[in-house]
Amino acid sequence: MNGRRASERLEKDAPLFRAEAVAEQQDRWLGTVLLVPRISHVLWTGVATFLVAGVIGLVGFGEYTRKSRLQGSLVPEGGLIQVMAPQPGVLTKVSVTEGKKVVRGAALAVLSIERRSETMGETQGEVVRALRARRDALVKERDRHIALFDGQDGARQRRMQGMNAALEHLQVEFELQHSRVDLSRNALDRQRALRQRNLVTEETLRSAEEEALDQALALQTLERQRSTLDLEKLDIEVAHEEAPFRRDLQLSEIDRSVAALDQEIAEAEAAREIVIAAPQSGTVTALQASAGSSAGPDMPLMTLVPEDSYLEARLYGPSSAIGFVRPGQRAMIRYEAYPYQKFGLYEGVVASVSRSTIGHLELAAAGISTVTDSGSEPVYRVTVRLAAQSATAYGEDAPLQPGMTLSADIVIETRRIYQWILDPLYSLTGEGKA
C-alpha cells in the first residue's frame, strides 16, 4: 500500500518531456541547419565515377595486341650474290659501275696475279710471249702448207690436162700407125706373091718385110707410150684424190699443235690474270672494287641483285622473341630510310621461320651487328613477304632498294585486357586462355 503511494507520488512529480527534448525546443527559433555540397565535390565525384566506369569498360572491352619487334633488311627472293676474287691479287680493270645491269658471263673485273722475278721481271708474261711466238710460227707454217698444197693441186691439174692432150694426139698417131702396119702387111703380101712368080728380086721382098717389121715395131712403141701415159695419168688421178687427205692430215697436226699452245697460253694467262665474270644476270650494287686495289676471297668486290627478283624482308631475332612467331602472321614494317612518324607503317606477312640458328656472317652481311643484349643468345631468321615493293613518300611511289635496314612488329595475338589479367589464373588452374 505504501509502495503504491510512493510510485504514484513519483509519477506526479516527473516532468512530461525529457530534458533533452525541452532543450531542443528552446533553440527551434534558430531554424534547421542544412549542409549544402560544394560544386567541386560534385565535379570530382562525377570524374571519379567516369574514370571508374572507363576503367571497367577498358578492362572489359579493351584489347591489347602482343607484338614481337625484330630487325632486318631487304633482300631479293633469291638472295644477293656477292662477287669475290677467287684468289689474292690486284685489280687491273673494273668494267662495271654502280647500278649497271649485266648479263650472265659478262666481264666484271680483271684480277692480276702476276709473279715477278729479279732477272726476268714478269715471269708469266715472258712465258706467254714465248708461247705466242711459237703459235705465230705454227700459224705461218700452216699458211705455207696451204699455199704449197694449192700449188701442187694446180700443177696436178695442169699435168692432167697435158696428159689428156698427149693421149689424144697419141691415139690419133696410133690409129695412123695401125693403118701403116696394115698397108705394109698388104705390100709384103703382094711382094711375096710377085716373088713366087719371080717378078721381083729377093732384095725387094726383104725390103718389104723390113718395112712391115718397122711399122709393126713403131705400132708397139706407140702402144708402150700410151700405156706409160695411162699409168702416169692414173698416178696423177690417185695423187689428186689423196691430196685432200694428206692436206687435212698435215694441217690437223699443225692445228693440234696450235690448240696445245692455245691451252698452254690460256693456262699461263690464267696464272697471270683472271677475268671475273658475272655468275648471273642482274644489277650491280655495293660496288667496292676499283682499278689498282687489292682483292681476295674474303673481300666482296660488288653485289649483284638478280634480275626480275622481288624484294622480301629478312628479320632476325633471338629465340625469346620468335617463340610464338608463325607463318601467316601480320607484320608492321618501319623502313629506316622512310621514318614511320612521317611516312607511316607498311604491311607484310610472315612467310617462313628458320628452324636453325643463323651465323654472325649472315648478320654482318645483312648490316645487323647484334639482335640480343648479350650477343650470345641464338638468332633465328624470319622471312616476311611484302605487300608492296615501294614506299609512298610525298605522294609518290619510291622503289625499295636491296639492303635497306628496317624493323618490324610481328602481330602475335590480340586479346581483351581482362583476359591478359586473368591469364595467370587460367594457367594455374590449367584451363587455358579465357
Image (cartoon, helix red, strand yellow):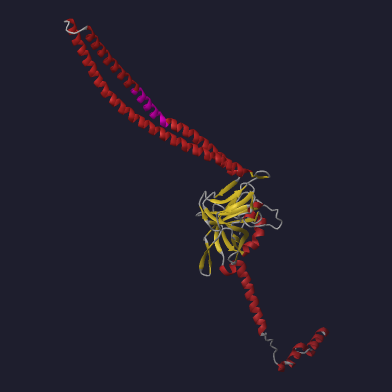
Q: Quadrant of the N terminus?
A: bottom right
State the residue at coordinates (60%, 53%).
301
State the residue at coordinates (27%, 21%).
174
Relative to 193, say whether 279 is above or below. Answer: below
Quadrant hosting residue 233: top left
Across and down, in percent, residue 78 comes to 54, 52
Relative to 98, say whether 56 is above or below. Answer: below
Q: Is residue 398 visible?
A: yes
Question: Which of 143 and 332 lies nearest the eye of the viewer?
Answer: 143
Quadrant hosting residue 404: bottom right
**Main structural element of the magenta stretch: helix, strand or loop?**
helix
Question: Which of 182 and 108 lies nearest the eye of the viewer?
Answer: 182
Q: Is residue 231 magenta?
A: yes
Q: Is residue 271 left or right of residue 181?
A: right
Question: Which of 179 and 187 lies nearest the eye of the viewer?
Answer: 187
State the residue at coordinates (53%, 39%).
135
Across and down, in percent, residue 132 comes to 55, 41
- The segment highlighted magenta reads 229-244
Across and down, in percent, residue 210 comes to 26, 12
Name, please, the residue furthest toward the bottom: 29
Q: Is residue 431 visible?
A: no
Q: Is residue 296 left or right of residue 236?
A: right
Q: Is residue 306 magenta?
A: no
Relative to 295, say whether 213 is above or below. Answer: above
Across and down, in percent, residue 297 comes to 63, 48
Name, please, the residue furthest toward the right: 2
